Image (cartoon, helix red, strand yellow):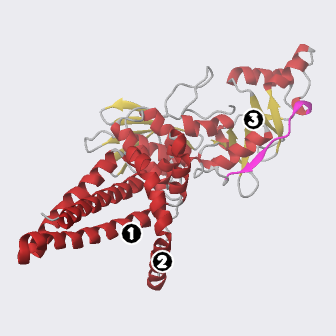
Amino acid sequence: MSSDLVGSIGLLLFFLLLSFYFSATETAITAAGKMKLKSLESAYPNRKKGFEWLADNIQKALTATLVGNNIVNIAAASLATTVCVSLFGKNGPIIAVASMTSVVVVFCEILPKVISIGYKEQVLYRSIPALSVFYVVMSPVIHVVNGLVWCIGKFLGLKLDVRRSFVTRADFEMMIRESSASGALEEDESKMIHGVIAFEETRVSEVMVPRTDMMAVTSDTTVADASAIFMQTGHSRVPVYQKELDKITGMLYAKDLLGPLSGGMKDEKVEGLLREPLFIPETIKTDEAFDLMKSSQIHIAIVVDEYGGTAGLVTLEDLIEEIVGDIQDEYDDETPDVLDEGGGSYLVQGYVNLEDLSETLGYPFEFEDVDTVAGMLLTIIGGFPEEGQSVGFGPWKISAVEVADHRILQVRMERQDGGEASGGGDSSRDNPKNDG
């Protein structure tokens, strides 16, 4: 065997090794993504600049690997043909095509990509120095290739800019679902993360204490009477109004009664003890309301409707519970919103939000104009039901259990197809509260 042939075989093996390298690097970059690359900057301080460059220039780096891979594959194929012709004569081209196809597919494509998916950090750590050098050397070619791709995309009306956020909202929600399914996240952790994601999409009107459930006192209430109300309800703050709830004049704090009580001024009116109320529209998002209440250092706000009337009230606790779930204290009623009675039967409080009900019972209760179970039953029946009156809705039999003062307080929902609700258990939200 001549020295030229040996040299050609050695160069062929070198090209195949480079093909392995470029395939592995390309897959490692794609599998890692920008967010992972950013995290590797701190994990490998001695490669920090390399990872910074890679995270900020993913498109250019991928172009470099593709250009390099194609160059070495074409060179390897040409060299293999020359070697096979020297060894096998006229059958050389056929043998070269068959052998190179097998080698490139198995050892230069499949194998390096499988390795890179499982060991992307190690592959990137070792490949970055050579990749950055190759990019500098080939930068003119890479810029030309990127320019051609951009022009073709422009001609076809395609936006070929791969720059995007670290991870989209849909990507993040998918990761949470997969992590929960695999056991990497506990159920409570998953619910909390979903609460954070949904926080900016929820309106205050969905979490507020409605007007009918508000505890409020009139401005001519005495200190003694107000103290009795605070002791009875366990609230620390209540709204104060003149004549009607649409005329809220201030907020009364329980601690502000300590001075008059200790001074023997039990018959003094609470009107002189009021604090400035915070009013927010019912259409405001919960994250905006949270920021406003936090910056104002006020834990309770009056929610007003589009006409300026009082729609309800909301507390910081109500907002925080949207993320962390129910926060119980010694004054909270322990009655669950959705009580599993067994056998596919559930006792549901009328104020329960339909989204929460759908999640708990594993069935979509969707109505355009109402948000609560009571509103749903009113819509289905077309009026106020009598206690015990039932109506069918899909596989559910819905019965009015408690109706008082034109309000549906409790309903019973029974699954008629014999199936159990997939959500099961008690819901996480509790009876409405005035204070946090």
Q: Separation of disc 3 and disc 1 at Cα?
A: 73 Å
Which residue is label 3 attached to? 216
Residue found at x 50% / y 69%:
139
Could you classify mark 2 by the number of other residues whose Cα lies within 10 Å: few (under 14), some (14-19), or many (20 or more)? few
Q: Separation of disc 1 and disc 2 at Cα?
A: 11 Å
Rendering quarter of residue 414:
top left
Three-letter code, disc 2 = Val
Q: Is residue 389 above or below residue 106?
A: above
Horizontally, is 107 left or right of 303 in the view? left
For marks 3 and 1, give the one nearer the viewer. 1
Which residue is label 1 attached to? 67
Q: Nearer the viewer, residue 318 or 45?
A: 45
Nearer-N-terminus badge (3/1): 1
Which residue is label 2 attached to? 144
Q: Is residue 62 above or below residue 167?
A: below
Horizontally, is 308 left or right of 141 in the view? right
Three-letter code, disc 3 = Ala
Magenta-highlighted residues: 272-282
Three-letter code, disc 1 = Val
Is residue 276 inside the magenta stretch? yes
